[in-house]
Image (tube, helix red, strand yellow):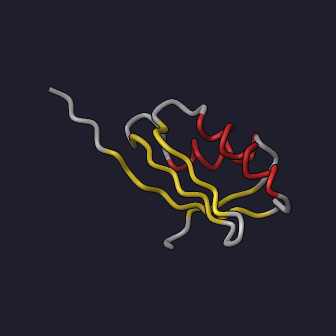
Amino acid sequence: MSTSTTTNTILRAEGFSCPSCVTKIEKQVGRVKGVEDVTVHFASSRIEVNHDADQATVQDLVDAVAKAGYSASPSAF
């Protein structure tokens, strides 16, 4: 029996300057297999992702943000 656990990962993003950037990031990260929910907090440059850690690693999430044209790194808060 396999149990999937949802992990909440917070990334700090850099380089986005407009609300439409939020949509681009949410779409790109949302395409990653295992991602359940993506919320980009424009004012604080935070990206909150709920995902299955077995399917989507933190590096997968960072890579997806990079694919959208922005840089991100894991953050504790």
**76 lies left or right of 24:** left
**52 lies left or right of 18:** left
Q: Dividing the picture into quarters, in which one does residue 72 lie?
A: bottom right
Residue located 82% across and 61% down the image: 15
Residue at the extreme top of the image, as rendered: 1
Residue located 73% across and 45% down the image: 23
User: Which percent across, then down, holds residue 17?
Assistant: 85, 62
Between residues 47 and 75, which one lies in front from this camera angle? 47
In this rendering, is residue 49 above or below 27?
A: below
Between residues 2 and 50, which one lies in front from this camera angle? 50
Image quadrant for the N terminus?
top left
Residue located 71% across and 64% down the image: 42
User: Which percent across, then down, holds residue 57?
Assistant: 48, 44
User: Which percent across, then down, holds residue 6?
Assistant: 34, 46
Residue located 49% across and 72% down the image: 76
Residue at the extreme front of the image, as rendered: 19
Q: How many labels does the image show?
A: 0
In this rendering, is residue 14 above or below 54?
A: below
Between residues 63 and 32, which one lies in front from this camera angle? 32
User: Which percent across, then down, holds residue 2?
Assistant: 20, 29
